[in-house]
Amino acid sequence: MRKYDVKKLWNGRVSLRDYIVEDQIKKQKSIMVRYEDDIMILSPMDLEKRDSMTECTSKYNGQKYKLYDYVWKPANKEREERLL
């Protein structure tokens, strides 16, 4: 399981870069997204059900990438303790 920290939510959604999502789907592994003190677990099946997609261009090297958005649904603390 890959851990991924995000600094902000946008319209109640969390955005993940395409190459991270595609890599985890290919490996059939989940992503644990952490925002402040909450976490959300996205299984490979959840990762395939992206809510929306935005194409972006890096301001550093001009390379294009996509952001996949997922509705933020944090896990409860009890589940978090079992996973860690």
Image: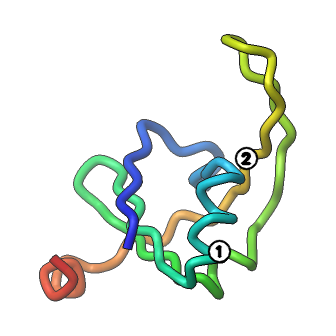
Q: Which residue is mark 2?
A: 67
| Mark 1 residue type | Leu
Instruction: Classify mark 2: residues with Cα within 10 Å, few (<14), some (14-19) or many (20+).
Output: some
Pinpoint residue 72: horizontal percent, then vertical percent: 53, 64
Residue at 57%, 70% (x, y): give it. 24
Residue at 61%, 43% (x, y): give it. 10
Q: Which residue is mark 1?
A: 47
Is 53 drawn above or below residue 47 in the view shown? above
Is 62 drawn above or below residue 17 in the view shown? above
Is 21 drawn above or below residue 63 in the view shown? below
Residue at 76%, 67% (x, y): give it. 51
Q: Is residue 10 left or right of residue 80?
A: right
Label 2 secondary element: strand
Q: Residue furthest front?
A: 27
Residue at 47%, 77% (x, y): give it. 30
Q: Is residue 19 left or right of residue 5?
A: right
Quadrant where the image shows the N terminus: bottom left
Pinpoint residue 17: horizontal percent, then vertical percent: 65, 48
Is 43 drawn above or below residue 11 in the view shown? below
Instruction: Classify mark 1: residues with Cα within 10 Å, few (<14), some (14-19) or many (20+).
Output: many
Pick whichever, 54 or 65, lies toward us. Answer: 65
Tell me where residue 60 sits by quadrant.
Answer: top right
Tell me where residue 65 sits by quadrant.
Answer: top right
Tell me where residue 77 sits by quadrant.
Answer: bottom left
Ranked by sequence position, the earlier of labels 1 and 2 is 1
Label 1 secondary element: helix
